[in-house]
Image (spheres, rainbow, N blue to C red):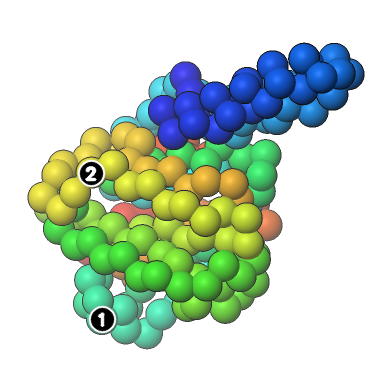
Amino acid sequence: MVARESVPYLLVSAVLGILFYAVLPALAVLPAVAFLFILFFFRNPGRQIPKNDTHVLSPADGRVQAIETIDYEDTFIQGKAVRISIFLSMLNVHFNRSPINGKIIYTVYRPGKYLPAFKSHASGLNERNTVGIENSQMRVLVHQITGFVARRIVCYPQKGDRLEQGQVFGLIKFGSCTEILVPADVKVLVREGQKVTAGITVLGVLEDD
């Protein structure tokens, strides 16, 4: 499947291809390549989600860029937390998936800059959309962060909506970073530098009291 957000880009590249071909057939190669890249970038492959109420699944495809402990997360988790930052390259699938089953009870959008998403300070300065999801066992925060190329965040659900674990809830166009913050009692299973897959990779497991 391909995201509906790709349609305007596909139409533009298709029209350019026709115009270029009319002028000089060899020129049509450029918009044709662009058309194929857009199809590739906006792909949404189907996935078998390994649902488990004690697991926190990756909200994005990419590579774990950083894992940091936060002494006190005061906006939503309201306690000690762990932040896992995932960098998405232009070649990754850019759909975001819900890491847990739950209800969206917190959302906030923050305009900002467009620094390269792999920079450590990009999270604090770049445009960002935040979704807070809660169930009976835990709360998690997911930050959708733009990058140098990515300048458009899409988030489908609204505050009050429910999400199934692994359900697609958003998209970041053309390269980005996704962060997830989990409570400190979630045992992190991934390491920095590790590749992860949205809705498949288990980032952490909720430990028993």
Q: What number is the disc on residue 161?
A: none
**Rendered residue at 23%/55% (across/down):** 133
Image height of 3 relative to 151, above or below:
above
Image height of 204 relative to 119, above or below:
above
Name the one closer to the observer, 138 or 150: 150
**Rendered residue at 46%/73% (across/down):** 112
Q: What number is the disc on residue 157?
A: 2
Quarter occupied by residue 207:
bottom left
- Residue type at mark 1 is Asp
Per the image, label 1 sits on a secondary structure element best described as loop
**Rendered residue at 59%/46% (across/down):** 174
Name the one closer to the observer, 177 or 81: 177
On the question of residue 116 being in view, the answer is yes
Per the image, label 2 sits on a secondary structure element best described as loop
**Rendered residue at 32%/83% (across/down):** 72
Q: CA distance from mark 2 to mark 1?
A: 23 Å
Percent of width and height locating residue 84: 49, 63
- Residue type at mark 2 is Pro
Quarter occupied by residue 190:
bottom right
Name the one closer to the observer, 87 or 99: 87
On the question of residue 98 being in view, the answer is no
Which comes sooner in the sequence, label 2 or label 1? 1
Percent of width and height locating residue 14: 63, 21
Percent of width and height locating residue 27: 84, 24
Q: What number is the disc on residue 74?
A: 1
The answer to whether residue 137 is left or right of residue 168 is: left
At label 1, counting other C-alpha atoms closer than 10 Å, the crowd grade (few under 14, some 14-19, many 20 or more) is few
Name the one closer to the observer, 179 or 21: 21
Image height of 175 relative to 1, above or below:
below
